[in-house]
Each structure stands twice: as C-alpha cells, then as structure tokens.
Image (spheres, helix red, strand yellow):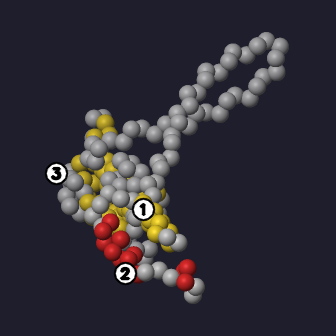
C-alpha cells in the first residue's frame, strides 16, 4: 500500500462523528495531498413525470379520399382512487379496500399458503386481507369494517399504487 493510499482512520471516524445529526449530505475535505469526498445517505430519487396528452377529435372524412383506419380507442383513464372503505356507488352498495402503500400485492403469507380471504367469504373488522410489500417490509392490510368479498381487483404478485383498490366488498352487519 503506498503512502498516498493510506487513510487516517481516526481522522475519518472523527469527521463522520461530527457529521452525525447534522443536515450535511456531502463534504469535500482537502488537507495537503489528501482529499476526502463524503456523501451521506442516498441521493433523492426523482419521481417520474406524468404527462397527460389530450386526444384530438377525429377529422371528418373528405369525399374521394381513401378511408383511413379509425384511430385506436383511447385507453380508459384510471378513476381517481377513493379512500379506503369508500362506497363504490349507492346502487351497488359496495365498498373497496385500497392500498395504503406503493408496493407488491400478495394474497397469502407465502407462495405455499392459502389466500387470506376468498371471494364469497365474510370477513370481520381487523381480519388480515393481504400483504403489500413496500421497501422490503411486509405490511398486513386489515379489513376496516366487516364485509363479504365480492371481487379481488389485483392479481397476486402485481405492483400496486397508493390508493389503488385491492378488494370490493358488500357490507354485512
């Protein structure tokens, strides 16, 4: 190991100790021939930009011009997410349980286990419905009110967004 590659570990520990509890995220320190560049924490992750592009109305056909293929049907825009336990409509008398996290949806505790809840099953308040894995943490999602499961809205192992409906229930007393 050359003289230049040696690090004074005690100095480094003192610098890191001094930075603990501060808002400093980057420090460049130069002392003679030595240069130390320290970055603390992880750089912030930029959120992907979402741009809405309005669909133009189809142009009227010109007589004598060859017929153009009709434009593809616009993809259905996702409905705004309702809060957990929100009614899906008075005519349906149902409510949804929505994801409180961005993560991965799992219907059971392990691939070999039975699902926590199946269609037609009645659940009690506080009963575990599924797991949403977020940042390597397994978060159990519980029923906020009793109900009979009408529909599972997400496939097992699929990514889910914050507020995305996971289950549709019919209320029970």
Q: Contact (CB < 8 A) between labels 2 and 3? A: no
Q: Secondary structure at mark 1?
A: strand
State the image coordinates of residue 154 (x, y, percent, origin top left).
44, 55
Where on the picture, by quarter, is residue 143?
A: bottom left
Q: Is residue 73 above or below residue 1?
A: above
Measuring 39% from the left and 38% from the top, which residue is drawn there?
A: 80
Q: Is residue 87 above or below residue 155?
A: above
Q: Secondary structure at mark 2?
A: helix
Query: Which residue was labeled with disc 3?
Result: 173
Q: Is residue 94 above or below residue 18?
A: above
Question: How far separated are the C-alphas under marks 2 and 3?
Answer: 66 Å
Q: Residue furthest front?
A: 32
In the rendered structure, which disc, 1 or 2, sits on the residue that comes first in sequence? 2
Q: Residue furthest bottom?
A: 1
Q: Which mark is residue 10?
A: 2
State the image coordinates of residue 120 (x, y, percent, origin top left).
33, 57
- The mark closer to the camera, 2 or 3, is 2
């Amino acid at each position: 190991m050359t003289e230049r590659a040696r690090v004074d570990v005690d100095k480094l520990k003192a610098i890191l100790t001094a930075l603990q509890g501060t808002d400093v995220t980057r420090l460049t320190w130069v002392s003679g021939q030595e240069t130390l560049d320290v970055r603390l924490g992880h750089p912030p992750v930029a959120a992907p930009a979402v741009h809405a592009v309005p669909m133009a109305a189809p142009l009227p056909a010109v007589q004598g011009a060859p017929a153009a293929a009709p434009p593809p049907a616009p993809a259905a825009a996702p409905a705004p997410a309702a809060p957990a336990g929100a009614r899906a409509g008075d005519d349906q008398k149902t409510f949804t349980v929505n994801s409180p996290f961005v993560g991965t949806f799992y219907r059971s505790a392990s691939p070999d286990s039975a699902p926590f809840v199946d269609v037609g099953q009645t659940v009690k308040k506080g009963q575990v419905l599924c797991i949403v894995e977020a940042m390597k943490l397994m978060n159990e999602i519980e029923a906020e009110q009793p109900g009979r499961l009408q529909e599972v809205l997400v496939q097992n192992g699929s990514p889910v967004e914050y507020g995305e409906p996971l289950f549709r229930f019919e209320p029970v007393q």
